[in-house]
Image: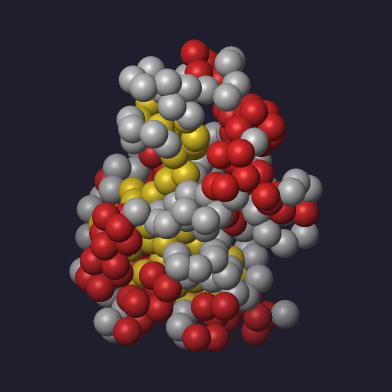
Amino acid sequence: MKSALNDMNNSFFQAAQLILQAKYLVAFTGAGISVESGIPPFRGPGGLWTKVDPRHFEIGYFEQNPEQSWRLIKQLFYESFKNARPNPAHLALATLEKGQRLKSIITQNIDYLHQQAGSRQVIEYHGSYRYLRCLNCNSHFTASEHFLNNLPPHCLECAGLLKPDFVFFGEAIPEAVINQSIAEAMKADVMLIIGSTGEVFPASQIPEIAYRYGSKFIEINIEPSNYTQSLNPIFLKGPAGQVLQQLMKVIANEEFKKV
């Protein structure tokens, strides 16, 4: 027991040193970072796909059945997400950015919690639920009650069908988002992987690209992931909020020693 505790303390120390020495620190976050905010993951036990039919999020099905899909979308996202708040993990990353240590966040999440926590350099790989996009003219709107009270919502410019501005099955990741994410991964000398299993393609390739360009890794997850063996990270096991709170204390202590 004592040996395991010493190993964990040593892992936190190594992770803190890696962050303090990093020249270009990038965070890559998945659904696990938002679980402590009350947002369930999509996959795994209790995940969203075990409770609803994923076809409602296929672009072809959505276009053919917009009212049916929109009723479910409103319930799952716009009604449940509105009470979610950033947890200590989101706040820790915002603090690292404010201290000019963290250069950017590449997130697979659509929940906007990084921005609510105060992070500014956020790449939303799969888009965001906070905005709506017209399938006809590509106009964008904030997802306000004006639209959500009348389902399915329609564009104010051309009356076309609006969809949430996140990526559905059958849709491509925007090229600009892919290019920006790859550019950040190539520059990263240290990458924080938080709450991502590495199962969602093509987002799962981002840490692999960073690895090919020489990045080192710190992984925070409740269980080992696809990245744990392939990227040889410093692995910190546990809920993202709890682990990052502890890691921030170790970082602060190491910084204090240098004063």
Q: Can residue 52 be seen in this view?
A: yes
Q: How many marks?
A: 0
- Is 137 left, or right, of 227 in this rendering? left
Instruction: Name, please, the residue furthest toward the front.
Output: 64
Residue at coordinates 40% horizontally, 78% vertically from top-left? 208
Residue nearer the viewer, 221 or 139 = 139
> Quadrant of residue 141 in the image?
top left
Q: Can residue 248 be seen in this view?
A: no
How far across and down, in percent of the image, does residue 178 sit? Answer: 32, 61
How far across and down, in percent of the image, does residue 18 sit? Answer: 34, 73
How far across and down, in percent of the image, does residue 255 sit? Answer: 30, 61
How far across and down, in percent of the image, does residue 13 sit? Answer: 44, 73
Q: In which quarter of the image is the N terminus?
A: bottom right
Residue at coordinates 25% horizontally, 73% vertically from top-left? 186
Q: Which colour scheme is used?
A: secondary structure
Does 165 appear above or below 253? above
Does 144 appear above or below 187? above
Does 10 appear above or below 28? below
- Is 128 left, or right, of 158 in this rendering? right
Residue at coordinates 57% horizontally, 70% vertically from top-left? 199
- Is 162 left, or right, of 72 in this rendering? left
Residue nearer the viewer, 1 or 34 = 34
Q: In which quarter of the image is the C terminus?
A: bottom left
Residue at coordinates 48% horizontally, 49% vertically from top-left? 167
Does 47 appear above or below 228? above
